Image: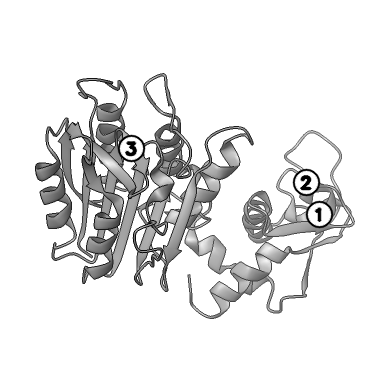
């Protein structure tokens, strides 16, 4: 699948220079270019310290005209908001020509034939993207468009240390913090990760989307292998089943170990199954019954069962969705 990204960072504003935006765009591009396993991901066009609105608008126009399945626009720099709407600001800004209008970017994305379009903005007032402007009092997102912004339209976006606060969390999300159990990182997952990481009095990220299919921005090594996830229907043929355990499932319950052991002693096949069940328990899909830990459930011949999240992944495995 063809994927292209335009990553823009501008620090060199003559009247109010910034310090982290070029670094933001550079680090984001370095993550997006490859997945966690080193496989190719996005084709990257990194542009820093663009001088004029004309150049910036041309780059964005070309992005949404590409022959790709998925495109991503990332911008870090100054943002501006007035009665005419929101703007991503360029160094040549002047009154009534502050930069590229967010409404114009939205129109380019809405009219693009590309299936999946993602816009990520780390700038002040970035939440104005996709918000109805006073001029037309309406706004819509075409199918396949996702927008993730650092703040609401009335808020500023803060720089701290080497990155914007928002981009610092975005980087952690793309490294795997926002990955689902299969290792996929979606725009919605990133928003949830960032939103939970910011305090109530911090800038609030905004997420808007009109999507009908799952979109992964990057993949990383999953917490457990897909094969183990799929085995869930083998151990639990029905959603409400319990898997019976006994001491033979615990590998330390062996005559080779110098402690008290209980019959039936560890059986290699059962130990293998139990280790898989323990991995499923570690990611919240399985819980022991009548015991606090899986170890005691085995040693006391209890059982384990699926959690509500386990039910979800059971259905995915049952109907070949993973």
Direction from residue 196 to residue 178 in the image, left or right:
left
Residue at mark 3: 79
Residue at mark 1: 298
If you read the primary sequence from the N terminus, does the residue marked by circle 3 or circle 2 appear first? Answer: 3
Q: Residues within 10 Å of mark 3 (few under 14, many from 20)?
A: many
- Which secondary structure, mark 3? strand
Q: Quadrant of the N terminus?
A: bottom left
Q: Is residue 22 above or below residue 181?
A: above
State the CA–CA distance, disc 3 to disc 1. Answer: 58 Å
Which numbered mark, 1 or 2, is in the foreground of this view? 1
Does the rendering let one see residue 220?
Answer: no
Q: Residues within 10 Å of mark 2 (few under 14, many from 20)?
A: many
Residue at mark 2: 253
Residue plotted at (39% across, 55% down): 147
- Of 228 and 116, the residue lying toward us: 116
Where's residue 45, x and y in %?
15, 44
Does the rendering let one see residue 98?
Answer: yes
If you read the primary sequence from the N terminus, does the residue marked by circle 3 or circle 1 appear first? Answer: 3
Q: Is residue 18 above or below residue 143?
A: above
Where's residue 161, x and y in %?
41, 19
Question: Where, by quadrant of the figure, is residue 76 drawn?
Answer: top left
- Which secondary structure, mark 1? helix
If you read the primary sequence from the N terminus, does the residue marked by circle 1 or circle 2 appear first? Answer: 2
Residue plotted at (30% across, 65% down): 116
State the CA–CA distance, disc 3 to disc 2. Answer: 63 Å
Residue plotted at (42% across, 74% down): 212
């Amino acid at each position: 699948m063809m994927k292209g990204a335009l990553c823009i960072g501008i620090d060199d504003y003559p009247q109010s220079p910034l310090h982290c935006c070029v670094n933001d765009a550079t680090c984001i591009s370095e993550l997006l270019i490859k997945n966690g396993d080193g496989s190719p991901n996005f084709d990257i066009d990194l542009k820093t310290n663009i001088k004029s609105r004309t150049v910036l608008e041309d780059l964005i126009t070309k992005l949404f005209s590409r022959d790709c399945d998925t495109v991503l626009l990332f911008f870090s720099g100054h943002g501006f908001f007035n009665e005419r709407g929101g703007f991503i600001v360029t160094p040549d800004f002047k009154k009534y020509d502050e930069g590229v209008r967010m409404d114009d970017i939205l129109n380019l994305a809405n009219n693009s034939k590309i299936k999946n379009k993602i816009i990520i903005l780390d700038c002040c007032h970035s939440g104005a993207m996709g918000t109805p402007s006073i001029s037309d009092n309406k706004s819509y997102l075409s199918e396949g468009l996702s927008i993730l912004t650092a703040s609401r339209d009335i808020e500023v976006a803060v720089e701290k240390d080497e990155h914007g606060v928002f981009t610092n969390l975005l980087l952690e999300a793309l490294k795997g913090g926002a990955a689902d159990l299969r290792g996929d990182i979606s725009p919605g997952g990133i928003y949830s990760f960032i939103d939970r990481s910011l305090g109530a009095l911090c800038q609030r990220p905004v997420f808007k989307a009109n999507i009908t299919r799952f979109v992964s921005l990057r993949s990383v090594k999953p917490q457990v292998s897909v094969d183990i996830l799929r085995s869930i229907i083998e151990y639990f043929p029905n959603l409400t089943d319990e898997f019976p355990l006994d001491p033979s499932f615990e590998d330390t319950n062996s005559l080779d170990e110098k402690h008290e052991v209980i019959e039936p002693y560890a059986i290699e096949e059962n130990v293998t199954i139990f280790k898989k069940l323990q991995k499923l328990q570690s990611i919240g899909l399985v819980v022991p019954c009548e015991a606090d830990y899986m170890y005691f459930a085995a040693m006391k011949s209890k059982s384990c069962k699926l959690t509500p999240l386990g039910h979800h992944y059971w259905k995915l495995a049952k109907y070949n969705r993973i």
